[in-house]
Amino acid sequence: MAEIFGTAAERAVLRMGSLEQAARIDRFVEDDGPARGARRLRVINGGGLEFDVHPDRALDIGAASFNGLPLAWLSATGITRPDAYEPEGRGWLRTFGGGLVTTCGLDSFGPPADDEDGVAGMHGRIGAVPGRITEARVTPELIVVAGEVRQAAVFQENLVLHRRITSRLGSSAFSIEDTVTNEGESSSPHMVLYHVNLGWPLLDTGTVVEIAAASVHPRDPDAVEGFEDRTRIGEPTVGFREQVYIHQAGDDRVARVINRARGLTLTLRYSDTLPAIFQWKMTATKHFVLGLEPANTAEINGRDSARENGALPRLEPGESRSYAIEIEVNAS
């Protein structure tokens, strides 16, 4: 039986008029600004963990906190309604609101692509596709939000993402379990990346990053320059240039962000169907963020490069592939 604020759930429910006193799913429709009309669910799990689910952004995770302390980086664009998405080129950045988990794919991530499989903007389009909610419930054991997101076009791909988000009541963790199925009639490229965006005050001067990996390589000269300091977070710096590192997963698929000054550790675990994790270190002023990004291919330079290097995953008609990530926060 789960515990709610240190009390066994079976005892806690005797002390409440409703379970919603401690744990619930609140539903909202945004009424102003670039998000107007978009749905948002607020999950409160009875253990100090709270996070937003955005059904109109592929059921991605937006703002999140633990015991009132924010965990995610949120950008100046805000998390907008899906029709604000700009699919061409690098227009993805115009509506990249950050948030704790942004899904990239399902047929491309990284730089824009224009190839035999069609045109895809930066990081793909799935993160701007509205989903259908199939389940949203709270029991004395578990909170569940589930849905279906379809990326499809006439004469092109027909990929369906089935997502299930769960959090055990009273815990400090939640999981995302995804299954992607090709419901089209032809083979489709399939690239997926989970863009986990961590910000202040979890991320701060002195925060340390630990990533279990078989190997790590810098993406470009900026990353080469910062290689020795890749695990340490410094002061926000005007003009800091992003540094990206490619980690080939080892036997332990785990990454940790440790803020000893606050006694806080965030742990990211990911399934063996995600053989790589990218580290995006961006500690500029206003853009003070660490990205931990499990992916189903280590090819960071986009679909064209993945195809050329024989590293482009594909889904055949009727084929499915499953992925999972878990985020846990611990305070000392």
Image (cartoon, grey):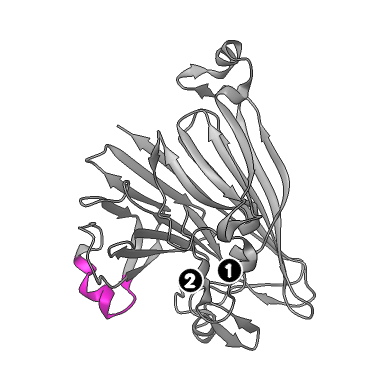
User: Which residue is the site of mark 2?
Assistant: 93
Q: Nearer the viewer, residue 185 or 81?
A: 81
Left or right: 127 as drawn, with respect to 293: right
Density class for disc 2 (Cα within 10 Å; few <14, some 14-19, many ≥20) is some
Residue 221 location in percent, x, y?
A: 26, 80
Q: Residue at x 34, y 76 (%)?
A: 219
Is residue 322 visible in this depiction of the protein? no
Task: Classify 229 as above or below 331.
Answer: below
Which region of the structure is painted magenta? 217-228
Tell me, yes or no, whether the two marked residues, 1 and 2, touch with CB atoms within 8 Å.
no
Is residue 295 visible in this depiction of the protein? yes
Q: Secondary structure at mark 1?
A: loop
Q: Residue at x 78, y 81 (%)?
A: 155
Q: Is residue 22 magenta-colored?
A: no
Which residue type carries mark 2?
Leu
Q: CA distance from mark 1 to mark 2?
A: 15 Å
Residue 25 location in percent, x, y?
A: 62, 36
Which dot marks residue 105? 1
Which residue type carries mark 1?
Gly
Left or right: 161 as drawn, with respect to 64: right
Density class for disc 1 (Cα within 10 Å; few <14, some 14-19, many ≥20) is many
Q: Nearer the viewer, residue 111 or 84?
A: 84
